[in-house]
Amino acid sequence: MASLDIILERAERRYSVGERETLAEKKNQIYIELLQQMSTSDLSDEVKETLERLHLKGYKIAIGSSSKNAKKPNPEVFLKAAEYLNFAPHDCLVVEDAFAGIAAAVSGGFDSAGIGEAATHEKVTYPIKRFQQLLDI
């Protein structure tokens, strides 16, 4: 709903709770469809280069996403990614741009790198301003 609020900030009219829920569902469906079509051409040069350099250094990378905002920070997606890669949480780094994502990482026992609003979380391990700063961690 937070991202829908941003979208509707400049709307010419107010929407009811029901209308907002319908719009949020449509927005999330579009998001899911876009994720399914996503390719490396959708990444910025900075992100592509950083991921390539991390890969060359031997880092294993997993990407997790949620199409809806969770009501509570839940580390499940991070725990599953760590399990998939055969690592313990304390051997992983969660990279997040959401405040709640940092809280979820902390509750799961992960170190975290926060970018954007996530960099301001009081428990973020590494606040960063640019994605390429991951190479310095």
Image (cartoon, rainbow, N blue to C red):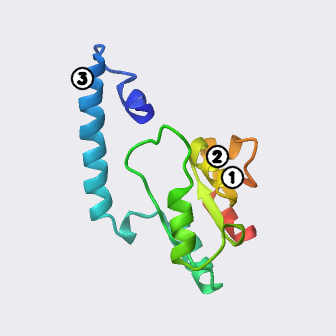
Q: Is residue 122 left or right of residue 105?
A: right
Residue 129 showing in the rendered view: no
Rounded to the nearest angstrom, the CA distance separating label 1 from label 3 is 35 Å
Relative placement, left or right, of 136 versus 49 is right
**Secondary structure under the numbered disc 1 in the rendered image:** helix
- Residue 92 lies, in percent from the top left, at 66, 69
Q: Quadrant of residue 78?
A: bottom right
> Rounded to the nearest whole Å, what is the CA distance between mark 3 and mark 2?
30 Å
Disc 2 to disc 1, how far (Cα)? 5 Å
Q: Position of residue 39 (x, y in %)?
A: 34, 69
Q: According to the image, label 1 marks what residue? A: 106
Q: Quadrant of the N terminus?
A: top left
- Give left or right: position of 100 versus 26: right
Which residue type does callout 2 highlight? Ala
Tell which circle, 1 or 3, labels the residue nearer the N-terminal end: 3
Q: Residue at x 64, y 57 (%)?
A: 108
- Residue at 75% across, 46% down: 123
Of 94 and 42, nearer the camera is 94
Q: Earlier in the sequence, mark 3 or mark 2?
A: 3
The quarter in which the C terminus is drawn is bottom right
Can residue 75 be spotted in the picture? yes
Which residue is disc 3 drawn over?
A: 19
Report the amino acid beneath label 3: Glu
Q: Secondary structure at mark 3?
A: helix
Task: Residue at 32%, 20% (x, y): give it.
Answer: 11
Q: Residue furthest top?
A: 13
Q: Which is more toward the observer, 15 or 71? A: 71
